[in-house]
Amino acid sequence: MTDTSIPQTEPVLVAIDISKTRHEALIAVPGKTRRRRVTVLNQLDDFPRLIGALSNYGRPVRVAFEATGNYHRALAFHLSAAGFETRLVSSVALARTREALNNSWDKNDPKDAQVILHMMEIGNLQFYHDPLLSGTNDLQELSKTHDIVSRSKTELWHRVLTHYLPLYFPEADRFHRSSRSDWFFAFLERYPSPHFISAMGREAFIADAWDAVGRRVSKERLLADIYETAKTSVGLPVDPRSDAIMMFRMVLAEGRSLIAQRNQIEDRAIALLKDNPDYQLLTSIPGIGPINALTILAEAGDLRRFQHHRQFLKFCGMDLATIQSGMFRGQSKLSKYGNARLRRTLWLAGQVAVLQPANSFRDKFERYISKDRNNTHLRRKAYTAIAAKMARTVHAIIKGGAPYRPFFEGTIDSRRTFL
């Protein structure tokens, strides 16, 4: 039966359980007690069939789903492009609601669709902003790929430090200072063992290695130090044509390739964002460089949609949560129910900011640890407070539309303008 007294503005609710190959959709039409279940294959010809069926109701359509890897992205894009309202449900809230409704942890696709529909009816939903439609897809791919390349490069560098250098040139690691340059990898690729160096005379080595070390300060002194170190090295005397040396050079070549990829991504990010007003505002904050700004814009999107900085803190998972029951009250900690990459970026930006002079982040950090500068627990709490302050500042700067001022403290609300 259909209740004709229901206004036409009441939306059709569609709960979708996402999976890799098929999606289970449960449709609730206002005024109808019976719900319709539809199976949608993850294929392009099935999406218009679902969109057409929903459009035929002649009502607004609200769709909700749980983010599942990246399998929800294609269907969500087509539904959003069709003009439907798309929402997310929290994975944690979904699990807790399923347990409460069914008194069991039992999980299957049709049951999850029912739980999602229940959460829609009680309004327990989150906003969904499709990256492709909102224009942040390129930023997200740049940010995520940069993170993958950086992690791979760090993992490879640790492999060189803990395996290859102890075997073939243990004393060489003291000459490495920065991971931003590939000169050290290029040098090792040319001289993977100190016996390659000691086989030459001092002047011959300096002349041969002059271009390999790049634009070093006091280059001749550095090369002379490396030569003297190589003469007394305990590295294994392996044959230059051995498979061991070939494997070492292969790893070093991979490291140089990763550094080149990282630099290429960073150059592209700067070129893409240099005229973006939000990017210019973010880079005015101490500790936030091009990649941190890229990550914030990619993961948070338009920060103006957060009416209060507490909403942004919760989105980052930096809101405080406390376990309390009866007379017991636990210690307040970060909830960490939020965007982990965004939270890590703000944490790293805060650590850089406290090392720079003349800014409010360093001032707050110094005041925080003034009671006991050597207390590691106090310093950790101080870094957490700085990361939260960084999040508040990022929100205020974007919301207010004015660059960072080192010692200006202010808050944002919907009734006035910041700065």
Image: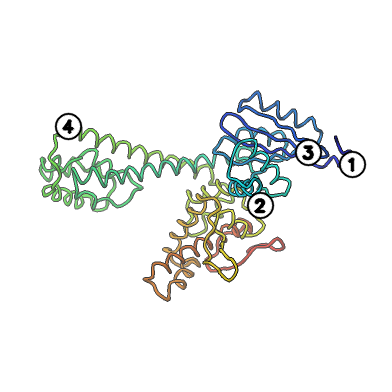
Q: Are marks 4 and 2 in contact (CB under 8 Å)?
A: no
Give whichever of 175, 312 is nearer the camera. 312
In x, y percent, where is residue 202? 12, 46
Indicate which disc residue 305 carries: 2
Question: Vertical placement of 375 versus 25: above or below?
Answer: below
- Badge 1: how crowded within 10 Å, few (<14), some, or many (20+)? few
- Mark positioned earlier in the residue sequence (1 or 4): 1
Indicate which disc residue 60 carries: 3
Label 3: state its secondary structure. Answer: loop
Label 2: state its secondary structure. Answer: helix
Q: Mark 1 points at which residue?
A: 5
Name the residue type under label 2. Answer: Arg
Q: What distance separates the C-alpha of mark 3 from that of mark 4?
A: 70 Å
Q: Name the residue under label 4.
A: 242
Q: For residue 208, which quarter of the picture? A: top left
Which coloring applies here? rainbow
Name the residue type under label 3. Answer: Pro
In x, y percent, where is residue 216? 27, 50
